[in-house]
Image (cartoon, coloured by chain):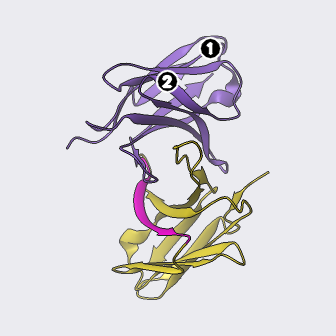
Amino acid sequence: DQQVKQNSPSLSVQEGRISILNCDYTNSMFDYFLWYKKYPAEGPTFLISISSIKDKNEDGRFTVFLNKSAKHLSLHIVPSQPGDSAVYFCAASGTAGGSYIPTFGRGTSLIVHP
Amino acid sequence: KAGVTQTPRYLIKTRGQQVTLSCSPISGHRSVSWYQQTPGQGLQFLFEYFSETQRNKGNFPGRFSGRQFSNSRSEMNVSTLELGDSALYLCASSPYGHEQFFGPGTRLTVL
């Protein structure tokens, strides 16, 4: 049973427009959420995160929104650039015995067209 | 600081063989985790090592094992390889906390 779901396998956006990537989770014990970006032939790289005590975190063009009651988070990229084309993974974690092992979604492939 | 390194980057094996993958974490990082990525399945957690002890384990068969050395370097072993083991195996290290730093992965192909 998937505890972190990214229901859109792919997303296509025009350069300069907003990209919105969505993620849903089921485990109420998750209290920290992360987004990773992955280019082909490379490992995932950390992009942005948010703690459950917040509902928004912003870093440059990237903003993550968290709706705890809906168990939903989203990543907004504004404006989108062709270099943003990559697979984006949503991840969620909770403190369990001092370990913070995240559970990942299956990823959303974002294509930004020039 | 140098990033997480994994060797080898590519590997081709046949069914029934065994394989050992290696990971060197970022200096100072004591936690090392391993993940399997297959098309459409995202990143599946295999296990985590901290100070040479397996601290967490995912839902994989006993054919998958690992260890961590005193210098935090880690190895992962898969015995009796099956076709379904073909995947990208990712190693990640972490100092403490939620963020993980990933290596480039080892692409394993089982024929």
Q: Per the image, is A44 magenta?
A: yes
* Residue at screen point 69% across, 30% down: B60
Q: In this view, does A76 lie above or below B105?
A: below
Of residues B46 and A31, which is closer to you in this image? A31
Residue A13 % position (x, y): 52, 81
Mark 1 or 2: the one toward you = 2
The front one of A66 and B8 is A66
Q: Can you identify the residue that label 2 sits on?
A: B53
Chain name for mark 1: B
Q: In this view, does A49 lie to the left or right of B44?
A: left
Q: What element carries label 1?
A: loop
The chief SS type of the magenta part is strand
Residue A114 visible somewhere in the drawing:
no
Q: Which amino acid does label 1 sit on?
A: Ser
Residue at x 43%, y 51% (from the top left corner): B97
- Amino acid bearing label 2: Thr
Label 2 crowd (10 A; few <14 / some 14-19 / many >=20) = few
Measuring from the top left, give residue A99's x and y in whole percent: 52, 43
Q: Which chain is yellow?
A: A
Residue at the extreme front: A97
